[in-house]
Amino acid sequence: MTRGCTYLAAVSALMLGACATLPEDAFRLSESALEMRETQSRTYEDVTDIQILSASSAVLQDLGYAIDEVEKELGVLSASKRADAKESAEIIGMIALDIADCLLTFFLGCENDAYESSKDVQDIKMTLVVLPDLSQNGVYRVRLTMQRVIWARNGTLYEQETISDAVVYQAFFDKLSKSVFLEKEGV
Amino acid sequence: MRNLLVVILFALAGCAAPTAAITAGGSQVELRQMQTREYETLDKRGTLRSVVATLQDLGFVIDKADYDLATISATKLQKYAIRMTVTVRERDGDRLAVRANARFNEQPIEDPKSYQDFFATLDKAMFLTLHEVD
């Protein structure tokens, strides 16, 4: 790609970004909102909100997160970390693409731009909210929401998303349940 | 240099943000009205908790939460990014005003429909919080 082309591409990307319109349903509950709430929530009994928050920060520390925000009056805890996002299958694919590009252009297009646009690192951010359950006394409800931004090797945005995979939430809550137990026992 | 000028003109023509131009210089009062809803309660904690629950339901992650200042900031990441700040203030000693303002990518959201949708969702959470908790 020539410099002019790169410049034009950058400007086009900027224009698209600036002109993108707000989806109509951005502030409406989606059809899967209830299901998502269940996936992202667990209840805990015979435990205080402070114990749950302490147990949560212990799990987050175990997982290498930094705590960004805690507001115990509202039961809010936010944490983030930067992690590896490389996928070897993708890397192999992209290198193959670059080689094919090189051969097809009779060695004129020998740049590793496909490889450079592959996933590199991800910034993960999560919020955990502990609130008293509205329908049961003495029960706390923990709700977790997670999102991530994935960056490509060349420093551009690869993807940003809200994490909705139930397996990820299940894995976190498994660890949290153990941690809450340890917290209660004073271990 | 000439190329740069052409590109800038092109960019301006392609993206003149027409709605912003129509309402530019409009009343600040209107913006506040569409971004604010009042609730007949003085339960600041319950209201803030409802705001947090609503934001989570809508797929936001909480960036900042401050009970004393009654301010919550949150971000939603899909193909786009929405950043939102919600504040709660007491009004006339008998009710609370919830004000929300949001940004879509880098532009402020000034479309009343978005705020109506947000408050419609918050209304439901407020109803549960204010009627079922002692």
Image (tube, coloured by chain):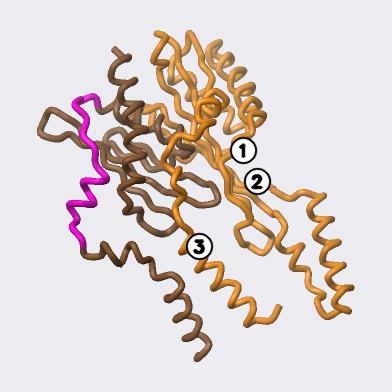
Chain colours: A orange, B brown
Q: Nearer the viewer, residue B54 or A79?
A: B54
Question: In the picture provided, is A45 more to the left or to the right than B71?
Answer: right
What amino acid is at disc 1? Gly
Determine the image quadrant of residue B26.
Answer: bottom left
Residue A82 picture location, percent across and down: 61, 47
Q: Nearer the viewer, mark 3 or mark 2?
A: 3
Residue A64, disc: 1
Please state the horizontal and vertical placement of residue A138, each as a whole percent of the image: 42, 9
B92 and A69: which one is in front?
Answer: B92
Q: CA distance from mark 3 to mark 2?
A: 26 Å
Q: Earlier in the sequence, mark 3 or mark 2?
A: 3
Question: Mark 3 or mark 1: which comes first in sequence?
Answer: 3
What stretch of residues is rendered in magenta?
B26-43
Numbered disc in front, either 3 or 1: 3
Residue A10 in the image, given as x and y percentages of width and height: 57, 72
Write the residue at 32% across / 36% down: B119
Q: CA distance from mark 3 to mark 1?
A: 33 Å
Quadrant location of the C terminus of chain B in the rendered image: top left
| Chain containing the residue with disc 3 | A
| Residue labelled with disc 2 | A83
Q: Label 3 belongs to which residue?
A: A17
Residue B45 visible at all: yes
